[in-house]
Structure formats: structure tokens, C-alpha cells
Image (tube, coloured by chain):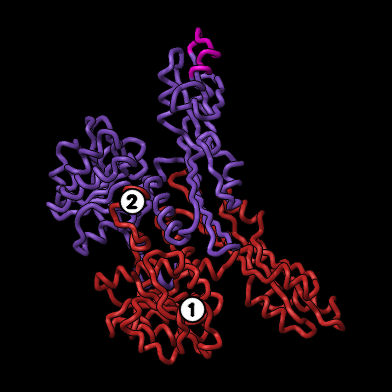
Chain colours: A purple, B red
Amino acid sequence: MIRVGIVGYGNLGRGVSLAINEAEDMDLVAIFTRRDPSVVQEGNVPFVKLDNVKEYQDKIDVMILCGGSATDLPIQTVELAKYFHVVDSFDTHAKIPEHYAAVDASAKMSNHIALISTGWDPGLFSLMRLFFQAILPNGKEYTFWGKGVSQGHSDAIRRIDGVKDAIQYTIPKEEALELVRSGKNPELSVRDKHLRECFVVVEEDADQKIVEKEIKEMPNYFDQYDTIVHFISEEELKKNHKGMPHGGFVIRTGSTNEVHKHKMEFSLELDSNPEFTASVLVAYARAIYALAKNNEYGCKTVFDIAPKYLLQETDEAQRKYLL
Amino acid sequence: MIRVGIVGYGNLGRGVSLAINEAEDMDLVAIFTRRDPSVVQEGNVPFVKLDNVKEYQDKIDVMILCGGSATDLPIQTVELAKYFHVVDSFDTHAKIPEHYAAVDASAKMSNHIALISTGWDPGLFSLMRLFFQAILPNGKEYTFWGKGVSQGHSDAIRRIDGVKDAIQYTIPKEEALELVRSGKNPELSVRDKHLRECFVVVEEDADQKIVEKEIKEMPNYFDQYDTIVHFISEEELKKNHKGMPHGGFVIRTGSTNEVHKHKMEFSLELDSNPEFTASVLVAYARAIYALAKNNEYGCKTVFDIAPKYLLQETDEAQRKYLL
């Protein structure tokens, strides 16, 4: 059995706990939190104060890090790779090289393996981009996100005066998807690709027209998009918009000669973004445990992992039943 | 530059030649054929009699084998793995373990690496099945093929008395695709999943009613399917049905808790089945060349190959631009 620990018990940490339950070859040993463990404790797995994590060095094989990319992971992944094999979902694309370098140094120093930027984007979508580009070099590729909740955009609306709560959905435009699928290699603006739909709860004395104008004209967040604003009651928001659905599409079209066109498409439709991301993290935790047994150390990404390591079945069984 | 050779110059071999042209890091050194090279010769790359292939042992790094799975590859892959790193597209699913064992022994004996069963199914579809199953263990997966030409079914029609020529398209049923995508985990019969559409040219004195009945009632090939038969002229068949389009879908739906469902979907739509398959072979030829440099020997499948090896870009560039 692979002995697994979780650091951070928000939506992603809860999802990892569910995914480990589905994995027959894994035991969840402990959940580490910065909060008071006795307050957070639920279920049978012990909750432990994060300060005491080093005591688990010989009790946990792989630690799955469920903190945020802005401030948690740049510190936690580097620090915890000194004591454990780790997996994180660091998703600030622009800072991946920097994060990689810091984690690599830390993991190599202590003979650990650390897999960063695992999830669906970065992660599965990145893998698809790699496969698609390698196979159809003479082509063009598009990524669309949604339909799904953007936390950043929802937060931006919530900061407007008079707004009590809000949820923003990013929605890929069907016309754009069809144009891409046709193989016409369109040049698409941000407005062409995605629509932004907002569900907003305002204070009683707020002027809806002003709020709507402020949303639609907000620089970078909304001004370059077609934006739809719905004003709804607090009850309706709670009832219909507290899920965390997401998804998206990676599409590449290309050609192999003057006349033959080809389309490769990968898509996800997820009821719960954090639970699905957690499932990806857990599958890759299995993989890095296997690689660690082969004495592979340092920082890795999904690009470095041979697919066979994601399953517990033997190579022989995989060839027989899956190939 | 990776020095590549091609064995077999049918549709797949021609496709490989096109794909190598698109690869900046590869040179096509020679094309080997059982036919008289002077008759087959076209373009600038030398055509060589297959009997003389051993003379190229020091001139070619990776040999891409483009013969058929029934009789060519079981012999050629085993034999040529003694002299070259090789890639094949062996696609008889049931015989993969047997083929693997024979090729593995041969390749290991001579310190070569041999990648078998590469293409889109087996190959990319198998990879997707592996990823999907690893990530959503609690789920159900479906593969649909088409719209595309089935050579086996086309040949079966051609063997009927009174038939001059025929093409059969396998078509996934849209209702079945939608039912699968809904996450209802339907149990689907072969009839539910695919439709068979036939374009048939008959001799002047043939009875179309009898031919149509023979097609529709043909055991295994057609009797379990809804089959549509069109009788057309020889000219129309040549004009509209000589392409080799294909494609398909791998879809998995699953759940992470009682209420949250997820869908993962991969699909291909190909104007030319052999040219696309060739593009996959060429990308994986690059990968096994890299693995050979790391002194990895023996038989491999796509499950064993870390994705990064498919591209010529450095690991660093891949992390920066693709992850």
C-alpha cells in the first residue's frame, strides 16, 4: 500500500481524500492543516498540525499538497520535498520555470521526487497540447475553457460597491468552437472565444444599472469580452450557483499533405473542478511512488511520466487489456 | 539528425515519408521494398531491395515498419529489431502479448529498442483509455469508431457474387454518443453503437435485391448491425469514395462522489487514416531514438514512453511553453 498524506484541507484537499478512497492501493495516513486540528477533524483519518509534519517522515510515502499557487506552494513544495515525495498543482503558468528550479534543488538534495503543476490545466491539457503538436506539427491549436466558474472574475465583481455576492461563468462560444473544428485555422480574439456570464446579488439600495456598467467596463477582466449580467436573489445564488463546475477543450487541426486535414480534440466536462483535479493528483501520486522506487529524484512534470505508472496494473496486464 | 528508414511502401509507408518531411530533426535515408526498386522508385530518396536491408545497419537509426499485421510484422519486426531500433503499428489486439514477447527477446539480444502497436488504435486511443481509467476509476468507458472506411467489411462485400466493387463506412450513432456523454452508463449493443453504410457497384446482370439481402444478413460482418446499402456507378465510387477517412471517440464518464459526475472525451476526425497513423509513428520514432541514447533496450509500447520524448524541444522549453 502507498501511504499518502494531504497538506491543506480546502476543496482540493477534500477531493484528494475522496479520490484516495477510490484507490485500492493507497492508505490515507494523515491530513495536515495550519488550523486547529481538533476543530477541523472529521472522519477517521487523523488531522495533524502542519508544524508537526516532519514527525511523519517515515510514515508517509507521498504527500499531496493542496495549498494555493500564489503563496502556499512556492514555499510548501520546496520545504516538504526535503522530507517526502510530493505532488502539487502549481498553476501559475508564467512562474513554472522558477518553481521548477527551486523544487528541483530541494528534492535532489534529499533524494526525493517532486511532481509539480499537476491537474488538468496545467496537466492533462498540457499533455494533450504536447501529443497533438508532436503528431500534427503542421497545424494550429486552440484551448477553450468552460463552461465553468472563474474564482478570479467572481472575486472581482464582489469588490464592486453595492455587490453582496457574485458568481462568474466562463463559457466557450459555440460558433468559435465550430470554426476551429472546421479546420479553417481562424484568428480568434478573446471576445470571439469566450463569453462571460455573471450572477450578481446586490445590496438593497444599489443601482443595478451602475453595477452592470462597472462590471462590463472593468479593464482586463470584462472589457474585452461580451458579458451578460443577471441580478438574482441571495437565495437563488445559494441554491443554483454554489457548485464548482468547469471544463474545456483542446483542439488541434492540421494537415499531412495539400488536401488531407485532421482534427484532434480533447474535452472535459466536470461537475466539480476541485474533485476532478484531486483525482489527477492521486493518479500521479501513484506514478511518482513507482518512479521513486526506481531511484529517480528531483522535480518532474507530467511530461516526464511514462503513462504506465498511473495504473496499479502490471505492464503485462496493461498491454493485454488496455493497449 | 535522426536517420530514418521505411520498410514497405504502401499507403502507410507513403504517409511516413510525408511525415518525415515535416520533421526538422529527421532525414529519410532509404525506403525498403520487396518489389523491384527501379519500378517503385519515385522522388529523391533511394529505394532499396528489402533483401539488402542489413547493409544499412550503420546508416539508419530508426526503421519504421509499414507492413501489415497479419503476415508482415510478426516476422519483420522480430527480424529487423536485430539490426535497428524499430517502430511498428501492429494492430491485432488479441495477439499483442505474443508479438511483444517475440520482439522483446530479439531486441534485447542485440541492444535495440522496438516500439510496437503504435498508431491511433492501438496507440492514442489506448493511451486515452489508460489516462481516463487512472483518473476516474469509478466510471465507464466507451470507444466508438468512424466515420471511416472498414477495409475488412468492404472486402467482405466485394466477395459477394455480382459485386464489382464496394466501400463500407462504419458510422457511430449520434444517439448512442449522446447517451454516453449524458453519464447514464448505458449498456449498448453493437447495433446501438454503430451503423454500417455501403456503397456498392454491381455487374450489369446482378439482382440488387439479392445482393442487398446477402450483405445485410452476412453473419458477424453485418447481421448484428443496421446496414444501409446504396447501389452506385463505378464512376461515382471512384470519384467520391476512394479516400481513406477515419476517426473515432474515446469517452469515459465517472463520478467522484454521490452527486458529482465528470466526462472525459478524446476524438479524432481524419481525412486520411494512413497519413495520420504515419504521423504518430514518426513522433514515436523520435521518442525511441532518445530512449536508445539512454541505453533502454527491448520491446516497448506507447505506455512506456514519457511524453516529453515525442518533441525535439528541450525539457526546459516544453515546461515554459507547453505546460
Which dot, 2 or 1, sits closer to the camera? 1
Residue B97 in the image, given as x and y percentages of width and height:
41, 78
The magenta region covers A203-214
Residue at left offset 15%, top offset 55%: A111
Residue B298 in the image, given as x and y percentages of width and height:
31, 77
Q: Does the magenta stretch include residue A212?
A: yes
What residue is disc 1 on? Answer: B66
| Vertical position of residue B196 compared to residue A272: above or below | below
Other-residue count near label 2 (Cα within 10 Å), few / some / many at <14 / 14–19 / ≥20: many
What residue is disc 2 on? Answer: A282
Chain of residue at mark 2: A
Cα distance between the residues tagged 2 and 1: 38 Å
In terms of depth relative to the viewer, which is nearer, B230 or B139? B230
In terms of depth relative to the viewer, which is nearer, B197 or A234? B197
Residue at left offset 41%, top offset 83%: B77
Chain of residue at mark 1: B
Residue furthest out toward the front: B44
- The numbered mark at residue B36 is none
Residue at left offset 21%, top offset 52%: A85
Residue B251 seen: no
Q: What residue type is labelled 2?
A: Val
Residue B50 seen: yes
In terms of depth relative to the viewer, which is nearer, B92 or A217? A217
Q: What residue type is labelled 1?
A: Cys
In terms of depth relative to the viewer, which is nearer, B247 or B317? B317
| Vertical position of residue B14 compared to residue A244: above or below | below
Relative horizontal placement of residue B240, taking residue B72 as reference (left or right): right
Quadrant where the N terminus of chain B sits is bottom left
Other-residue count near label 1 (Cα within 10 Å), few / some / many at <14 / 14–19 / ≥20: many
Residue B194 in the image, given as x and y percentages of width and height:
65, 64
Residue A296 in the image, given as x and y percentages of width and height:
21, 60
